[in-house]
């Protein structure tokens, strides 16, 4: 019980948990172990002197509905100081109603922020073949959720990757190992202000 007295439990080395909660884009689908952007994030945190331990609870194929069912257990188990939410892409690819996805994202954000946790929402976009109304509404959904829930937003995780075949796997949906490094570079500027001071010793 005493280990839970602090706002966020520290690991044995004094680090706090940073939870990455997403789908295949964050689970490292199709790339070698340790080469997904969440794994690369751990290496960068250590290099830059930030005392966080990345916990990657991402599941390939996850929707916002599935994520909402899983999140309470993940939060209770790891009690992270920071949560990175990367969900919604599979909802969009299945053409699910935007109102449902947005409601789920808001609930995910509210749960994540409980207790003063910091939250970063990673936005996504749909291919143009889904139609202008759906694609524009999908993109705006992330901005609306971030504004409504007062959390940090990265508008598009796959910026500079999705339109470059050399950075994508053959399925055209998932970044390859080169693309994973760009995902981290995209996420880092939005995440950095949430980390607090680095250990410069």
Image (cartoon, rainbow, N blue to C red):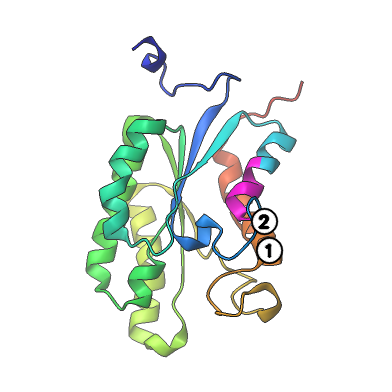
Residue at (46, 67) in percent of width and height: 124
Quadrant (top left/top right/bottom left/bottom right) for the C terminus: top right
Task: Kindly identify which residue carries mark 2.
Answer: 185
Q: Which of 72 and 184 is in front in this view?
A: 72
Task: Kindly indicate the quadrant of the structure image that contains residue 157.
Answer: bottom right
Assess disc 2: are there few (<14), some (14-19) or many (≥20) residues with their C-alpha within 10 Å of its C-alpha.
Answer: some
Total numbered labels: 2
Vertically, is 88 above or below 16? below
Secondary structure at numbered mark 1 = helix
Whether the magenta-drawn stretch holds residue 10 is answered as no
- Give percent across and percent down for residue 27: 51, 56
Task: Tell me: 106 left or right of 164.
Answer: left
- Give percent across and percent down for residue 16: 52, 28
Secondary structure at numbered mark 2 = helix
Span highlighted in magenta in the image: 36-42
- Give percent across and percent down for residue 35: 66, 55
Q: Nearer the viewer, residue 177 or 112?
A: 177
Q: How far apart are marks 2 and 1 (CA)?
A: 13 Å
Vertically, is 119 above or below 17? below
Earlier-in-chain disc, 2 versus 1: 1
Task: Tell me: 156 left or right of 109.
Answer: right
> Residue reaching furthest top?
2
Vertically, is 117 above or below 8? below
Mark 2 vs mark 1: in front: 1
Mark number displayed over residue 113: none
- Give percent across and percent down for residue 68: 28, 51
What secondary structure do most residues of the magenta stretch adopt? Answer: helix
Residue at (72, 36) in percent of width and height: 48
Task: Kindly indicate the quadrant of the structure image that contains residue 160.
Answer: bottom right
Task: Kindly identify which residue carries mark 1.
Answer: 177
Residue at (61, 54) in percent of width and height: 37
Residue at (58, 32) in percent of width and height: 52
């Amino acid at each position: 019980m005493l280990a839970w007295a602090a706002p966020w439990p520290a690991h044995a080395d004094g680090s706090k948990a940073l939870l990455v909660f997403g789908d295949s884009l964050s689970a490292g689908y199709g790339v070698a172990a340790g080469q997904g952007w969440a794994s690369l994030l751990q290496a960068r945190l250590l290099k830059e002197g930030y005392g966080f331990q990345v916990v990657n609870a991402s599941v390939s194929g996850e929707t916002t509905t599935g994520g909402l069912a899983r999140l309470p257990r993940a939060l209770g188990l790891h009690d992270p100081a920071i949560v990175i939410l990367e969900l919604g892409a599979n909802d969009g690819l299945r053409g699910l109603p935007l109102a449902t996805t947005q409601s789920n994202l808001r609930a995910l954000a509210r749960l994540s922020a409980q207790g003063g946790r910091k939250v970063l929402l990673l936005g996504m976009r749909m291919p143009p073949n889904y139609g202008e109304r759906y694609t524009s509404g999908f993109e705006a959904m992330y901005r609306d959720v971030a504004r409504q829930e007062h959390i940090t937003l990265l508008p598009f995780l796959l910026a500079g990757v999705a339109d470059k075949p050399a950075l994508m796997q053959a399925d055209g949906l998932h970044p390859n190992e080169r693309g994973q490094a760009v995902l981290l570079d995209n996420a880092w500027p939005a995440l950095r202000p949430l980390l607090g001071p680095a250990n410069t010793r």
